[in-house]
Image: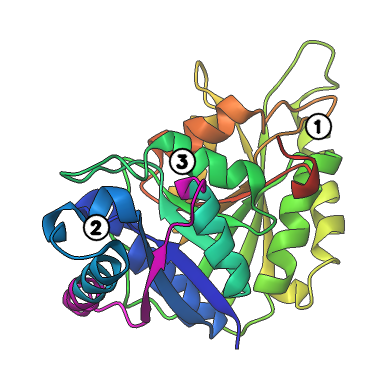
Amino acid sequence: MPRILAATEGSTVSDAVLPHASCLARALEADLVVVRVLSPLLDCGDVFRLGLQEAVQVVSARWKEELTARMAEMSVPGDPVIEVRQREEEIHDSILRAAAEQDAVVAAMSSRGSSAVRHALLGSVALSVLNKTPIPLLLAGQRIAPPDTQRPDYHIVLTSDGSDDSLRAVEAVVPLSDHPTVRVTLLRIHAPRMGDRGDAVEIAEATADLDRLRSRFPAPDRVETVVRSIVRFGGIDSAIVQAATELRASVIALATHGHSRKYHVFAGGAAMGVLGQSPLPVLMVRSAPAAHAS
């Protein structure tokens, strides 16, 4: 059975991603593994009278019990795991290692968070994970809202501008869509530019391009296509968020970089803009192979 790995650091903010990860796991018929990273020298100060190895065991047991209780309170079924940070390993490396060890198909975390002891899931950590992960990363931003746990389907609104980079997001979502409760809407934002052949022609061409992308999916009949024009004085990021909200999406999926000749949709700033504005989680897919990450 596939696994989804969700990382938390114990704060309310970082826990906000857990219900969304649970909804995705249920839709994909996947197991949910919830991981908290323990840094021995940083997190075991309250049991300093013990040796370090014994202190790690004590804190790990306590954290696992606390994490189990929090998951129960949030009605999030899954397996709690305390991952001990290895020597000279950064927090994001521990999360990536855990995802690899669990053979996760998706990782999930909040893009910011804090605890009384340390700031473990700040945006820089989430971005470091995103910069290196070979799998899609489900991110909950600062405006995240609770999911609708009663809806019978899981609706992925996948943005694509037709560039090679944005096709990576399509390739990542295709296997996720092969489940009866998952449906997909392909979304393109039309931004008029000087020299265009007019809105009618450009929108028709964009619609035809999205129709061609539908053939990549195992169940094209469950894939819809939508082209929206950018709101006057609005940005690409706000247009994506508005369209996805109106379409009652469960998640927004996009590539982190890339652009086509006509549409500059997925520059990193725009992707971060979507995350910063969205009440929905954002499923981000690296536009470059992880092996080339710096």
Q: Name which of mark 2 and mark 3 comes first in the sequence.
A: 2
Q: In which quarter of the image is the C terminus?
A: top right
Residue with the mark numbered 3: 125
Q: Distance between the residues labelled 3 and 1?
A: 39 Å
Amino acid found under the numbered disc labelled 2:
Gly
> Looking at the picture, how far across and down is residue 210, in whole percent?
79, 52
Q: How far apart are marks 2 and 3 (CA)?
A: 15 Å
* Label 3 environment density (alpha carbons within 10 Å; few <14, some 14–19, many ≥20): many
What residue lies at 71% left-to-right and 21% top-to-bottom? 192
What residue lies at 37% left-to-right and 81% top-to-bottom? 78
> Looking at the picture, how far across and down is residue 61, in whole percent?
24, 76
Residue with the mark numbered 2: 10
Q: Name which of mark 3 and mark 1 comes first in the sequence.
A: 3
**For numbered disc 2, what is the local secondary structure?**
loop
**For numbered disc 3, what is the local secondary structure?**
helix
Res 202 label: 1
Instruction: Say whether residue 106 is visible.
Output: no
Range of magenta residues: 64-91
In-image side of 284 versus 233 (left or right): right
Residues at marks 3 and 1 touching, judged by CB atoms closer than 8 Å: no
Depicted 270 relative to depicted 25: above or below: above
Tell me which colouring the rendered structure shows: rainbow
> Looking at the picture, how far across and down is residue 180, in whole percent?
61, 85
In-image side of 159 versus 274 (left or right): right
